[in-house]
Amino acid sequence: MSDIPYLRITTSYYKVVQVPTINNQFNESLIKWDVSTIIQDHGRKYLDDIPKFNGKICFPNHFDFSKEIHGFYNTYSPLSHVPKEGDFQNTIIFFKHIFGLQIDLGLDYFKLLYQQPLQILPVLCLVSKERSTGKSSFLKYLKEVFGHNMSYLDSHSLNSNFNMDWGDKLLLGLDEAFLQKEEVTEKIKYLSTSNKNKIEAKGKERFEVDFFGKFVMCSNKEDSFIKIDSDEIRFWVIKVPKLKLEDVHFLNKLIGEIPAFLHYIQNRKFASERKTRMWFTAEQIYTTALQKLFNNNRNRVEQEIAHLFLSVMEKFELDEVNFSLMDLLNALVKTRVKTDLTQLRFLLKKDWKIEQKNNSFKYQKFVILSDGEIVLLDTKGRYFTVTKSFLTKNFDDLMTD
């Protein structure tokens, strides 16, 4: 690459500038530059020496980095820290604090970010109701290591159609995450395992790019920051404990150890091996914090089901309700409760311990019409039966109305 600060991509000219931040750092940015201004400043012959590219591409590489990839300009940013042997004891202490008993997997996760940035990884979620845990510091640390290749997002950014500023980043950090909109959650789920993304900017056509972004979320809402199903395997949820001793200079100590830690990570062998498309198995990244998130979502579904059954019983003065899985799922869809047949089957058989009839019999199923009215219709099939006494015993808080 030339030392000339300008370049031409397709037919447009740009200037490579270093944008200062409030933290005394610089982010590299391309600013469109008028060719007549370049000529005015340097003369027409200067244009002959400006590097020319066929287009833009984003290709992550932390070891054999090049700004030119087969005639295309690489928008990925080289890391500012160079590995160097040294002390990194504070960093190891910090990783042990964040990952706990899963420290080896945590170090593998970081090693994959550093050495194999194209590898798909689970959505890492650090949660705790308490303050001063180091969750946000972990995001800041990743930003220091990977620089301009990490972007901070919020639910508004994810919900927007315009993603030019983050669609080609290695890391996507969400601090104080609380994702209430289902479409945002679904987008994260999709992108976490996708290798393609559509980039869109205001006033420009969408175009497809290779996607290799990894989501890292922090939240103080341990059991409700996102709604995921019990069969979800894309999320690694870790409850981070409160720091025993708060050191306001600790992040600076970690930053000072980055070269030594990168040297260690580069020479450290993996403690795990790739067994799934996200490297880790669901069993490896299972935590009680993840189970708590499952349970909260399941409990919400249980409450809605109990409310629904009671409504049917009260309307038709019944002591029990008969239904198939599809009857129940269709009714829950009408009431905008997110679940699926697998979750319902597990809930009824394992938690409620209700067995389906072995043979097909006539029964009356309940149906919610488009106007919200509930009706009973004669049908035939294998069905479950739930009694009012069961609901009274297990959901007594619903019987107070």
Image: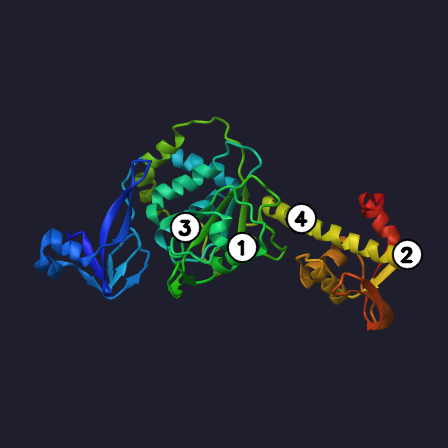
The residue identified by callout 2 is 319
Q: Between marks 2 and 4, how big is the CA–CA gap? A: 28 Å
Looking at the rendered structure, the kind of residue marked 2 is: Asp
- The tally of labels here is 4
Left or right of 329, for residue 315: right
Report the front residue among 315 and 139. 315
Question: As shown in the figure, which amino acid type bears the numbered disc 3?
Answer: Leu
The residue beneath circle 3 is 171
How many angstroms separate mark 2 from mark 3 (CA)?
54 Å
Instruction: Tell me residue 20's x, y (percent).
Output: 28, 40
Residue type pointed to by label 1: Val
- Rendered image quadrant of residue 26: top left
- N-term mark: 1 or 3: 3
Q: Residues within 10 Å of mark 1 (few under 14, many from 20)?
A: some
The local secondary structure at tag 3 comes to strand
Is there a contact, CB below 8 Å, between mark 4 and mark 1?
Answer: no
Is residue 172 found left or right of 221 in the rendered image? left
- The residue that disc 1 covers is 184
Q: Between marks 1 and 3, how big is the CA–CA gap?
A: 17 Å
As rendered, which of 281 and 134 lies closer to the eye? Answer: 134
Which mark is nearer the camera, 1 or 3? 1
